[in-house]
Image: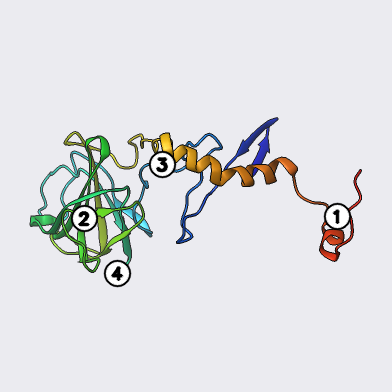
């Protein structure tokens, strides 16, 4: 892909593996995807924001709300917001059915009030960003179906809507060398530019395209 604006050219390439999966990078091997998804569920609205002095709707007392509640119908898929290792899968107090994932750089994410977990999900398992790990519910202390999502850095809660999300690390070493080999033909296509309709038709019919 190529995009030109303000006299500047931006390019992105997407090599795919055998399964047809891939992500976009700059030609230099820098990922264009953040290390985390801002909201790990397709939600209808935010029912409660990060607030250290919220009046709890069930307990009817002031209690810190150290996450964001994304309202969505029961059964809506919940995705891992970033790649990491599943640290906990099970029930935990007011969270109800909850999943905790440990990520690089001492980041931990929490997914609460789930109706159920993805089949076969277990502690110790590695999950990729975007993998479905569970489904929206209202288990634990919840007044309606939603995902309660927390984002912690070094054990300290951060507002998931405002925290600066880290970049994906750029490719390096053998991975970068393999990337450059795989993307060289793609970048060459961008250099040549799109074929004109006349030349494309002539090439398809076996005739020699005219140059100009």
Residue, disc 1: 199
Mark 2 neighbour class, 10 Å CA radius: few under 14, some 14 to 19, many 20 or more? few
Residue 60 horizontal/vertical position (percent): 11, 52
Q: Are marks 1 and 2 in contact (CB under 8 Å)?
A: no
Q: Is residue 48 above or below residue 141?
A: above
Q: Earlier in the sequence, mark 2 or mark 3?
A: 3
Q: Earlier in the sequence, mark 1 or mark 2?
A: 2
Q: Is residue 48 above or below residue 146?
A: above
Residue, disc 4: 75
Q: Earlier in the sequence, mark 2 or mark 4?
A: 4
Question: Residue 45's image quarter?
Answer: bottom left
Which residue is located at x 56 percent, y 37 percent? 27
Determine the secondary structure under disc 3.
loop
- Between disc 2 and disc 4, the foreground one is 2
Q: Earlier in the sequence, mark 3 or mark 1?
A: 3
Residue, disc 2: 125
Please state if 40 lies on the left or on the right of 31 as rendered: left
Mark 4 neighbour class, 10 Å CA radius: few under 14, some 14 to 19, many 20 or more? some
Which residue is located at x 17 percent, y 54 percent? 57
Question: Residue 154's image quarter?
Answer: top left
Residue 117 horizontal/vertical position (percent): 21, 65
Please state if 33 lies on the left or on the right of 90 as rendered: right
Which residue is located at x 53 percent, y 49 percent? 14
Question: Residue 206's image quarter?
Answer: bottom right
Determine the secondary structure under disc 2.
loop
Is residue 172 among what the camera can see? no
Which residue is located at x 46 percent, y 38 percent? 176
- Between disc 3 and disc 4, the foreground one is 3
């Amino acid at each position: 892909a190529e995009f030109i604006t303000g006299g500047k050219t931006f390019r992105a390439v997407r090599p795919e593996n055998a399964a047809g999966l891939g992500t976009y990078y700059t030609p230099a091997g820098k990922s264009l995807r953040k290390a985390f998804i801002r909201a790990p569920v397709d939600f209808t609205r935010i029912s409660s924001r990060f607030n250290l002095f919220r009046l709890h709707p069930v307990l009817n007392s002031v209690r810190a709300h150290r996450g964001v509640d994304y309202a969505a119908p029961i059964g809506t898929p919940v995705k891992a917001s970033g790649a990491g290792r599943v640290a906990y899968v099970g029930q935990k107090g007011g969270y109800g059915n909850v999943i905790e994932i440990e990520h690089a750089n001492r980041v931990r994410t929490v997914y609460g009030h789930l109706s159920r977990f993805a089949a076969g999900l277990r502690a110790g398992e590695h999950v990729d960003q975007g993998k479905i790990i569970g489904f929206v519910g209202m288990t634990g202390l919840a007044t309606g179906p939603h995902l309660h999502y927390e984002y912690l850095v070094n054990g300290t809660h951060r507002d998931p809507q405002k925290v600066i999300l880290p970049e994906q690390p750029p490719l390096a070493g053998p991975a970068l060398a393999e990337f450059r080999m795989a993307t060289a033909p793609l970048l060459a296509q961008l250099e040549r530019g799109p074929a004109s309709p006349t030349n494309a038709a002539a090439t398809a019919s076996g005739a020699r395209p005219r140059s100009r």
